[in-house]
Image (cartoon, rainbow, N blue to C red):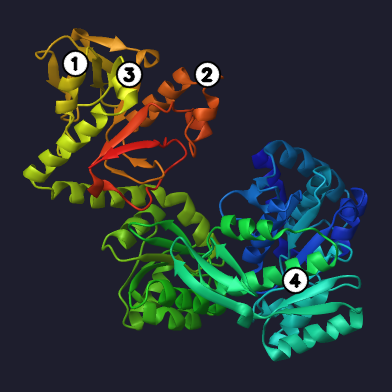
Amino acid sequence: MTVQEAIEYINRHTWSQWKLGLGRTEELLRRLGDPQKRLRFIHVAGSNGKGSTCAMLERILRAAGYRTGLYPSPYIEDFRERIQVNGEYITEEALCRITAQVAAQADAMEDHPSQFELITAIGMVYFAEERCDFVVLEVGLGGTFDSTNVIDAPEVAVITNLGLEHTEYLGNTLPEIAAAKGGIIKHGSDVVCYESDEEALRVIRGICEEKKCRLHIARHAEITPFQKDLSGQRFSVRGNTYRLSLLGEYQLRNASTVLTVIDVLRERGFAVPQEAVEEGLADVQWPARFEVLCREPLLILDGGHNPQCAEALAESLNAYLPGQQVTFLIGILADKDVEKILDTLAPCGARYVCVTPDSPRAMPGEELAKRLRERGAQAEAVTDMQEALRRALAEGAPVVAFGSLYLAGDVRRNFRVPCKEAQRRVALARRRVLTDALRAEKNHIICERLKSMPALQEAGTIFSYAAAWDEADLSEFHEWARRQGKRIAFPVAPAGGVMHAAVPHGPDTWEKGPYGIQSPVKDKSDIVTPEEIDVILVPCVAFDRDGGRLGHGGGYYDRYLAEYGAAHTTERSLDTLHQGMSAAAGACAPTTILIAFAEQELPQVVCEDNDIRIKDIVTA
């Protein structure tokens, strides 16, 4: 069974074909040896905030030294996100092998398990195989009859923020919703509940009294926020200060729930050091929850999909972008309360680009745009996601993608190319406005800084570049290097081909290349191999301080730097390789230097898997 075959098998049994209930999951797990009985759980139900709460808990427990399982729902980009151990997705081998094992048992059952029930079984088998100390288990739908509820009493049952959702299954009032979510509460568990509507809390209290469980209410008033920006937020609770990498004021309320869970775990005898709590909150990542995909231009992704999520988004926009009107890239499922969502977002939106999420339940983008235009809003519908992102980014206003997790996955798969295009426009415009005098001054400063660097003083062969357009010009440095007896190689890059490093025989052995760049004539130059090169000086369109580099889009330097890194990687030098580099791209030796004007710096360059980061940067 291949990964694709495994996923197709699982998806073949869509949950909507089945009645809610635990019988199928219980039978399937019994046939598989009841792996869930060998595991310890934190079980999380609720309407909003489940995923973020689970992510924070998992990251803290991992920092505390526990081997963690995480079962979030649904996934954003990769199906394997659904089952994670110690922050790593289930391996392809394990997914295929366990799915085949589960399928053999499921296909023998008279009442075939549904999609979510199959995934739950696969997860339980994998978590047991991996000997997880804790599994943070997110409920899929409701609580009482959700397939995850086949577990025995968890260490902690967690109820996050409650709202009206899936009313056809869970009920039409908050107390009815609370009763469904409270179905995960079992005798022997502690219960932590998000501070919520009093009617809903009354239901949860009643269930806890019936099950003889201790109830702990997360008190939001204990949270004192004191700093926030688009890189994170800081807050204090009962004398302890924390940094949270997740954005949005609602995440502070979710963090309050998480900290209450940690207190309960400590009371139950589990060691969770304060340092682990601080590290976990600072390092936690959770996609599509007010997630900044690009800082400049600003692109925020929020997978919220109901009125409560829209309210949280509006609150976050007012907090992080006060007084600013944003462009919404929006797609909503037709069975949501679309009108209330649009009412909530209206004060924040200046313009709307509407798309159709990849779901049979999606409202067509044209219909959504029509409704927005009827409200007097500027709205257009676009079918292709990359084009929709280009349209949204075109006017330079902050862009917020919102409305559905189906939309979120599509945005995450497609945002890099349009954002890179926008970043190139920004950086090139900044470079072009430099006066000739200022550019000459900066060129001189950069060259002087290069001359003073030990790596360049000791280098025998340097791979540099001939400045094109308005790039930083290194001619002064080249003259100095030649006087020192060094070889200077320059790129030879035929259109669509492979870049080589060429040392020209003389000043008359140059030509204009296919991109209008002056290059050595290959036949009148010495081609040097990557192994012969000591230092590479790399031009760019834009850069950031984490080594991210944005070129003109041809990929020549990334391919060459990967080859160069592989040629210079030795067992002795492995510890000195650049951090943050794609393993697939190879390892770039620490003798690469990025050259740029300071005006070309961006807060964060959008990088792809094959983009190589460059540690050393020389600017002026």
Vertically, is 568 above or below 175? above
- Which comes sooner in the sequence, label 4 or label 2? 4
Q: Are marks 3 and 2 in contact (CB under 8 Å)?
A: no
Q: Quadrant of the N terminus?
A: top right
Vertically, is 425 above or below 218? above
Instruction: Write the residue at 35% across / 71% down.
Output: 326
Query: Mark 1 or 4, which is nearer the eye?
Result: 1
Q: Which residue is mark 3?
A: 458
Q: Which residue is mark 1?
A: 482
Query: Mark 3 or 2, which is nearer the eye?
Result: 3
Mark 3: few/some/many CA within 10 Å (<14, 14-19, 20+): few
Task: Calculate the distance from the C-alpha at mark 4 to the C-alpha at mark 2.
Answer: 50 Å
SS class, disc 4: strand
- Residue 72 vs residue 292, the one in the foreground: 292
Instruction: Write the residue at 56% across / 79% down.
Output: 308
Task: Calculate the distance from the C-alpha at mark 3 to the C-alpha at mark 2.
Answer: 20 Å
The percent position of residue 63, horizontal first and vertical second, equals 68, 52
Q: Quadrant of the C terminus?
A: top left
The percent position of residue 429, horizontal first and vertical second, equals 19, 51
Mark 4: few/some/many CA within 10 Å (<14, 14-19, 20+): many
Kindly identify the amino acid type of the residue bearing the numbered disc 4.
Val
Task: Calculate the distance from the C-alpha at mark 3 to the C-alpha at mark 4.
Answer: 61 Å
Query: Mark 3 or 4, which is nearer the eye?
Result: 3
- Which comes sooner in the sequence, label 3 or label 4? 4
Q: Which residue is mark 4?
A: 158
